[in-house]
Amino acid sequence: MMAQKHKAQLIFIYGAIPLALLALFLYLIQKPDFLFWWDERFHALVAKNLLNYPWIGQLYPLEVFENASASSAWYNSHIWLHKPPLFSYIEALFLKVLGAGLFQFRFASALSMLLLYFSFLRIQILLDLEKWTASFIAAGLCLNPFLLKLMMGWQGMDHNDLAFITCISLAFWMILAYQQKKSTGRLILISLFIAAAVLTKWLAGFLPFLFWFLADFKKGRIQGLAPKLRALGLSLILIAPWHIYTFWAFPAEAKAAFAFNQEHFAAVVENHQQPWYFHFQQWGSHFFLLLALFPLALILNKTSKKAKPQFRAAVFSVGFVLVFFSLAQTKLPAFSFIALPLVLILLSSLSPKKPFWRYISLGFLLLALAQMAYLPFVNFADRYPENHSRAQFYRSLKGRLSPDAILIGAREFSNIEAQFYCDYLVLNLSTPTAFLQKMEASQRPIYQIVYDEKGREKELRPLP
């Protein structure tokens, strides 16, 4: 009887819950039938362009610019090095295998959310939380509206930030697994996930190493230093080739991208100025249900002895993340959420290992479900009529024009998403005159975009 109950529990936790979550994720990613502005449309176009030019991310063809030096700002460039390449290649793979559509583009993020569930689940179980409790909290976290909006592209930084959080969470899972049972396979997976994080969003991806080194710091020295250094070395070996390649093949673009990303710490970039306590506000706004579990855990239990090294390391690591991003002059909502697995480690270390905590975690899941219940019912066409209308217009053009057709006169930045929808080169109102003259001389068909009285795309007018 006990064996049957255990089997049913495993089927529910590892089968029914993730399948239900995946069904929800797939429903949500198809709800908005258009690309969102910052930054989903840029991510989508770069991924789509990789299907034809797989060696490097591209936004516009080089021919649009008078010379390579004129291609500078990340949103108006030929070579696109604004973000590391891994998540773009993953999205491009889904476009290649499943078709170049919006649902297919977002499908990778739905799977990222599923991986988050498993990583959150295993992190808690490895810290001795009861399986039902761990599954309820993991599922509740994956119903968080902020994370769901990242998956849908609705929240700025979208799929890139979600992929980053996922890679880091997987690395924490493997570190805890390695601490329980050391193996070469787990060591390699730690290196792979951390390298994947860095190749998704820069050096903050090394955060799991900080936790790992601190968790094994005992009596004035780091225990098991050699395997940690091997894992770090393997991560660096995996990360280095892309950086060497870009600085060798595209030195000007690589230096500009590196300098721009360095600037985020010392200066306010693109008007993302916020008070020093901004990231504390973000945690309170978006993860208050998770944080509300902490006082309950503190009242009902003390830190377990087994979890003390991980607890201390997680406290320091969370503090490091919050201080670092609070000192950074450019502040964006999801920056500090890479600490999610660390916060989960803290909560798991404090949580009572008693059956009644299961019911509290079930309450957390039900409240999380209520918190996100509005999302499936949002009518995106009504809420964002211009975006919906634009997507419909450009999709209707697909296959109707010559493949080398050029569309000019698009609203600023709307030409980015337009190129994802319709496969033609679409340029905005500031198209370089020299390029247009060159295209006219080459006899390429050029069309002017005409707008209706509401300012929405209406039709194309061929230029003589």
Image (tube, rainbow, N blue to C red):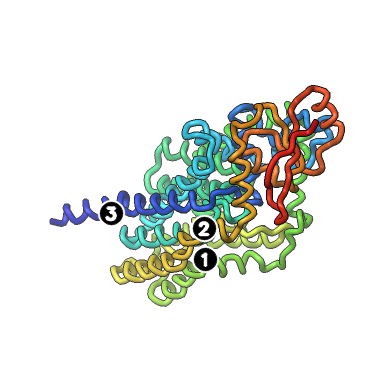
Q: Is residue 281 left or right of residue 28?
A: right
- Nearer to me, 312 or 135: 135
Residue 430 in the image: above or below residue 121 = above
> Who's the residue at 61% across and 69% down the image?
281
Kindly indicate whether the residue at mark 1 contacts the one at mark 2 (C-beta within 8 angstroms). yes
Front label number (2 vs 1)? 1
Local crowd size for mark 2, using a 10 Å CA cut-off: few (<14), some (14–19), many (≥20): many
> Who's the residue at 65% across and 38% down the image?
419
> Who's the residue at 40% across and 38% down the image?
183
The answer to whether residue 374 is visible is yes
Local crowd size for mark 3, using a 10 Å CA cut-off: few (<14), some (14–19), many (≥20): some
Q: Which residue is mark 3?
A: 12
Among the two numbered marks 1 and 3 on one chain, the one whose residue lies closer to the N terminus: 3
Among the two numbered marks 2 and 1 on one chain, the one whose residue lies closer to the N terminus: 1
Q: Secondary structure at mark 3?
A: helix
Residue type at mark 2: give it: Leu
Label 1 to label 3, Cα distance in Å? 25 Å
Q: Which residue is mark 2?
A: 340
Q: Is residue 430 left or right of residue 130?
A: right
Q: Which residue is mark 1?
A: 287
- Percent x, y of residue 232: 56, 39
Q: Quadrant of the N terminus?
A: bottom left
Q: Secondary structure at mark 2?
A: helix
Residue type at mark 1: give it: Phe
